[in-house]
Amino acid sequence: MEKEKSCGAVIFREENTRRYYLVLKSTQGHTTLCKGHVEGEETEHETAAREIREETGLEVEFIHGFRRVITYSPFPGTVKDVVFFLARAGGGEIACQPEEVEEARFLPLEGALAALTHPSDRDTLAAADGFLREG
């Protein structure tokens, strides 16, 4: 069985006491959270930070204590783990990586949940929002 690993984050911004979450529309047509494959000897956080920079141009600050792993089979004979963290977006404008990301936007929770293609991404976003609400 071949194993793959990706890392990313549920990314949020707060404006006027409202929280907005980043969703990406990929060039393949699905809407997802920001993530990508581990390269070399990177740590999980290093992978997530690099992928976020590459795909969106954003710098983030990780929120301690949230880590969620989704495991699935993208094709027969392959098992993939996707590790998600929670991160606050720094300042700056979004700059999409044109090879992978068609559009990136911050949406309120309800809009972000409705936009995401995969149930596992919706579950991850809901868990991250719950983590933030519990403070």
Image (cartoon, helix red, strand yellow):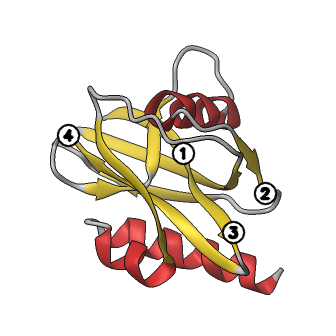
Return the disc, 4 or 1, that comes first in the chain's sequence. Answer: 1
Q: What amino acid is found at the position of numbered circle 1 in the picture?
A: Gly
Residue, disc 4: 27
Q: Which residue is mark 2?
A: 63
Q: Secondary structure at mark 3?
A: strand
* Left or right for 32, reference 37: left
Estimate the x, y position of residue 21 in percent, counting from the top left.
53, 66
Residue 55 image offset from top left, x and y in percent: 44, 34
Judge the density around disc 2: few (<14), some (14-19), many (≥20) Cα neighbours within 10 Å. Answer: few
Pointer 3 or 1: first along the chain: 1
- Rendered view: 75 above or below 86: above
Q: CA distance from mark 4 to mark 1?
A: 18 Å
- Secondary structure at badge 4 equals loop
Judging by the rendered image, the residue that carries numbered circle 3 is: 14
Looking at the rendered image, the disc whose residue lies closer to the viewer, 3 or 1, is 3
Work out whether residue 10 or residue 88 is closer to the camera in this orientation and state it: 88
Does label 2 or label 1 sit earlier along the sequence? 1
Q: In the rendering, at what x and y percent does residue 79 appear?
A: 34, 43
Front position among marks 2 and 4: 4
Query: Horizontal placement of 116 versus 83: left or right?
Result: left
Residue in the image at 69% along x and 45% along y: 91
